[in-house]
Image (cartoon, helix red, strand yellow):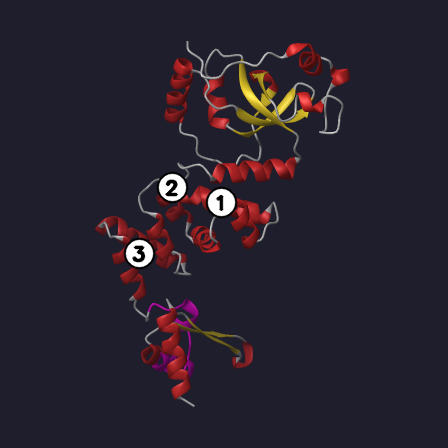
Amino acid sequence: MAKAYKKQSLGRGLSAILENPDQDINSAHDSNADKLIGNIIDLPIDQIQRNPFQPRTNFEEKTIEELAESINELGIIQPITVRKTGFKSYQIISGERRFRAVSSLKIKSIPAYVRIANDQQSLEMALVENIQRENLDPIEIALCYQRLIDEVMLTQDQLSKRVGKKRSTISNYLRLLKLDPIIQTGIRDGFISMGHGRALASLDNQEDQLKIYKKILVDSLSVREAEKIISKKPKEEISKNNKELKSPFKNDLKKINNKLGLEVKISLKSNNKGSVSISFNDIKDYNKIIKILNSEK
């Protein structure tokens, strides 16, 4: 079997570090840390654990088997990255597909780039590395972005710089998480595109999302066709709260809807207190609202 990766000879110094607990390295400041940290060495498979922070949730067995066949034939082309967690103990930061593939073969070790990292650093590295992959589905990417915001405490601006993406791109992915779980699954399984998902995410009501999602599937609608349906959504399909309104609010609501041609909601509390909200789809709709309001002065 031809191997694409040439094993590195451990040498007496590194061998002693790996085998002697008295010389174990726990930080980059320890003696001889430079011999281990930042280097690529062959590590035994049984000393490596999977990453509990792994952001990737969808590992296709078929692709793992294909990768295993390639490794068996050509060898391991790219080392995995691990962090040291203890004596003879390492945890994957990136490269879990390669690790799974190698684990299914009769290979006892795998080349690994060793790092020192805490839990948060490991999570961030795993998430950022995962986002750079080309075969992630949009929902996986959105979940990675959300985890970086929630768990690594990054703002969207910081996230934009960290992953090299425009903030608007990140926002578009995050909007997909507003979709009903059924629709998210549809995107992951390739039934609809991310463009369809972005259009559906403009609807706040998940029941409305599902109605149009089913129509997209049944009629094989393009993104453009779906957007037209959503923008022309009958204005009488208003919130349950609006349907239960009594006069004079119900009559006034109808007049406002007709005048603006947009969805208007009235939310009432006790003593007839409440709020009026107007939904618009783009800057053109917004300017239309402002123009009508100014004409009333």
Quadrant in the picture for residue 40: top right
Q: Is residue 67 left or right of residue 45?
A: left
For badge 1, the amino acid type reads Leu
| Residue 287: numbered disc | none
Numbered tag placed on residue 188 in the rendering: 2
Residue 136 position in % (x across, y down) = 42, 38
Residue 274 drawn at (x, y percent): 51, 77
Quadrant showing the C terminus: bottom left
Q: Earlier in the sequence, mark 2 or mark 1?
A: 1
Q: CA distance from mark 1 to mark 3?
A: 24 Å
Give residue 212's mark: 3
Distance in Å between CA atoms under marks 2 and 3: 18 Å
What secondary structure is found at the residue carrying circle 2? helix
Q: Earlier in the sequence, mark 1 or mark 3?
A: 1
Where is 154 relative to 271, above or below? above
Residue 53 placement, left or right of 137? right
The residue drawn where x is 62% and y is 12% is: 10
Number of other residues with Cα within 10 Å of mark 2, as a class: few under 14, some 14 to 19, many 20 or more: some
**Residue in the foreground of this view, choosing between 214 and 170:** 170
* Residue range (magenta): 237-256
